[in-house]
Image (spheres, helix red, strand yellow):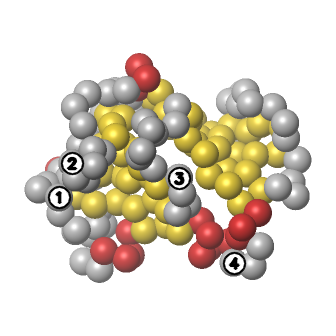
Amino acid sequence: MTHGLTCRIVIDENSKQLFSRMDVDNSNTPCSIDSSNPNDSSFDLSKSFGDGSEKVALSLNPPPEKGHTTRVIRLQHQGFSQDNQLNALGELKDGNINDGVLELKIQHEDLDQQRCIRILSPIGMIRDGRAEKGRSDCDYDKSF
């Protein structure tokens, strides 16, 4: 959201990666004032976790459409957001999906709790929550 531009946060469920780019003509410029290196604006859950990362799972609700593994959140500098998917060419598909609600869950198979993050579009609200192992519903009354 630097420079008054919109940032694109791409979430890849299979690779367990999130990365940001300025949302201008498929730019590789990260959404960071401090760096022009595209790798500086990525978060690799597997790499960050280290040994045992195969026990960590990232899931999206609703899941991407069949044949896709990524979801995109577009965050505008005014605070608004859009929840999109990419088409087969890596281009944004039109419109918000699932009424603008996206939920990310991070789970480790040896732990009893999983972390939940809900993003509500178009208002750009981000909520932090948790779910007990074996439950699908996240509780947003208590943060993780």
Mark 3–mark 4 Cα distance, whole angstroms, equals 17 Å
- Tag 3 residue: 13
Q: Amino acid at mark 1?
A: Asn
Say few, some or many: other residues with alpha carbon within 10 Å of mark 2 (under 14 / 14 to 19 / 20 or more).
few
Q: In what element is the residue under mark 3?
A: loop
Mark 2 or 4: in front is: 2
- Tag 2 residue: 91
- 88 relative position to 127: left or right: left
Circles 3 and 4: CB atoms closer than 8 Å: no
Q: In what element is the residue under mark 1?
A: loop
Circles 1 and 4: CB atoms closer than 8 Å: no
Front residue of 57 and 106: 57
Say few, some or many: other residues with alpha carbon within 10 Å of mark 1 (under 14 / 14 to 19 / 20 or more).
few
Mark 1–mark 2 Cα distance, whole angstroms, equals 8 Å
Residue 64, compared with residue 140, is above or below; it is: below
- Tag 4 residue: 50
Residue 108, compared with residue 103, is above or below; it is: below
Front residue of 79 and 119: 119
How many callouts does the rendering have?
Answer: 4
- 106 relative position to 92: left or right: right
Q: Amino acid at mark 4?
A: Gly
Circles 1 and 2: CB atoms closer than 8 Å: yes
Q: Earlier in the sequence, mark 1 or mark 4?
A: 1
Mark 2–mark 4 Cα distance, whole angstroms, equals 32 Å
- Tag 1 residue: 26
Q: Residue at x 33, y 37 (%)?
A: 84
Q: Earlier in the sequence, mark 2 or mark 4?
A: 4
Front residue of 141 and 138: 138
Mark 3–mark 2 Cα distance, whole angstroms, equals 18 Å
Q: In what element is the residue under mark 4?
A: loop
Q: Position of residue 133 (x, y in %)?
A: 85, 41
